[in-house]
Image (tube, rainbow, N blue to C red):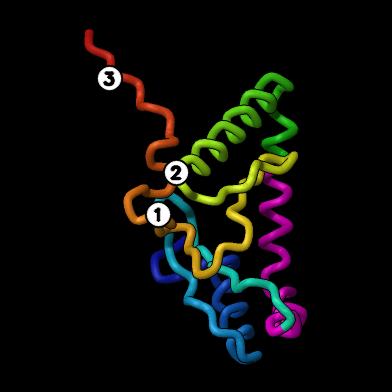
Amino acid sequence: MPSGRLSRGDEAFLQFTACMRRHGVHMADPYRRTGHAGLTLDLPEKTSATTRAYSSCNHLISFVEEMKAAGMQARENAMSYRQRLARQQGLLHYASCMRTDAIPMLDPDATGNLSLGNVPRHRADRPLHPTVPPGGSCLPPRAAPWRG
């Protein structure tokens, strides 16, 4: 992709944001998250006040959601039973550890999705607890560097 050009997904995120704003929903601009390709959206909570806007605007990003779901399904299909079990156990441990750090993370669902539930004014790139970065003490320790 030439520099200065947006991907189809990034364009869709910008159009979705503009559509939601036209329908009276305040939402932050899409932004780049370190380690992720393309733009990221912080979606507003789905409430009675945003339902109409979502109904009018979701079609703009539906193909992005479908592509992500297809990619996740392909990765899931390529995993062995042991790999899926190990991933699920790791995610359960991570969610439990986050709760011990006062971060209200729910257990992962059957497909491995983690959620903070309905946490007001939360952004995924900002810590919920002032002294604990997202996943801070819950991340597995890095392996010691190999020394020959």
Q: In the image, is residue 23 part of the stretch drawn in magenta?
A: no
Q: Amino acid at mark 1?
A: His
Asked if residue 142 lies left or right of residue 44, the reply is left
Q: Rate crowding at label 2 as few (under 14), some (14 to 19) or many (20 or more) other CA atoms within 10 Å.
A: some
Q: Name the residue at 62% across, 62% down.
A: 118
In which quadrant of the rendered view does residue 143 lie? top left
Image: 99 above or below 46: above
| Magenta-highlighted residues | 49-72
Q: Which residue in the structure is indicated by mark 3?
A: 145
Q: Which structural element holds mark 3?
A: loop
Q: Earlier in the sequence, mark 1 or mark 2?
A: 2
**Label 3 amino acid?**
Pro
The answer to whether residue 52 is above or below residue 58 is: below
Residue 73 versus residue 123 in the image, above or below = above
| Three-letter code, disc 2 | Asp
Which of the 4 image quadrants contains residue 18? bottom right
> Image height check: is 3 above or below 26?
above
* Marker disc for residue 129: 1
> Helix, strand, or loop for circle 2?
loop
Measured as percent of width and height from the top left, residue 30 is found at 49, 71
Which secondary structure dominates the residues rendered in magenta? helix
Q: Are marks 1 and 2 in contact (CB under 8 Å)?
A: yes
Quadrant assignment, res 80: top right
Q: Position of residue 69 (x, y in %)?
A: 72, 51
The residue mark sitting in front, 2 or 3, is 2
Image mark for residue 101:
2
Q: Earlier in the sequence, mark 2 or mark 3?
A: 2
